[in-house]
Amino acid sequence: MTLRALALNCSLKADPGATSSTDAMLQVVTDALAQHGVTTDAPVRIAAMNIKPGVTSDEGDGDEWPEVRRRIMDADILILGGPIWMGQLGSVAKRVMERMDAFLSETDDEGRLPSYGKVAVCAIVGNEDGAHISSAQMFQALNDVGFTIPAMGAVYWVGEAYGSTDFKDLPETPEKVSKTAAMLATNAAHLARLLKNEGYPAAS
């Protein structure tokens, strides 16, 4: 069974050519997913797009969210990647989650959200503490709008307290990160295949 993943890079860097630790972590995840036959296109740099604030699927006047939404709907697995800033999830990732709030009012005739049957995982980087609270924010929001979260659904790396080293600057991926990404990929691909084969039933 063919599976597709979509990676959203929620770095605060708007220049798609700028190196990003979020991109580096997303590469770790997509490489791990590839071992399970999951294909992933190049990450979408959200800050480089005109993603308007709001909670609908189209805020008009040049809003580029509708195209991102289409790609989310075309994928089986969503990889939401972002950095920690000031001890919490970065604002770009929060905007993505706010836009997906629209799913709550876009149910089908059986009460299912458009994201039902899709798996979501998280990839987080930072130079400070905050990985757990950031993944908690992501998981709650993603589950609220209909995504299914697999076991070990988040992988993260944070640098030494008061340090200046970024994930993208590491000479190699830490073993613990690689092992966690491998578990994430195994579980996400397995769950996505189960849901693609037999989705959620209609609401009773």
Image: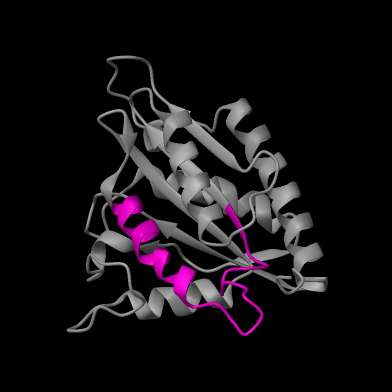
Depth check: give the residue in front, 53 or 87. 53
Q: Residue furthest top?
A: 161
Q: Residue furthest left?
A: 61
Q: Is residue 189 magenta?
A: no
Q: Residue shown at 48%/68% (left/top)? A: 104
Residue 171 shows up from this direction: no
* Quadrant where the N terminus is found in the figure: bottom right
Q: Residue 96, percent across and down?
A: 36, 60
Q: Seen in the image, is 98 located left or right of residue 184?
A: left
Judging from the image, the colouring scheme is one colour
The image quadrant of residue 170 is top left
Q: Is residue 97 magenta?
A: yes
- The relative height of residue 12 versus residue 112 in the rendered view (above or below) is above
| Image label count | 0
Q: Residue 70, percent across and down?
A: 47, 80
Q: Residue shown at 49%/37% (left/top)? A: 136
The image quadrant of residue 36 is bottom right
Q: Residue 87, percent across and down?
A: 31, 28
Q: Residue shown at 62%/27% (left/top)? A: 175
Q: Seen in the image, is 75 located left or right of residue 202?
A: left
Q: Residue shown at 26%/69% (left/top)? A: 51
- The relative height of residue 167 versus residue 144 in the rendered view (above or below) is above
Q: Seen in the image, is 126 located left or right of residue 176?
A: left
Depth check: give the residue in front, 86 or 43. 86
* Quadrant where the C terminus is found in the figure: bottom right
Residue 102 shows up from this direction: yes
Q: Residue furthest front?
A: 204
Depth check: give the residue in front, 122 or 104. 104
Depth check: give the residue in front, 92 or 198. 198
Q: Residue 82, percent across and down?
A: 39, 46
Q: Which residues are magenta?
A: 92-120
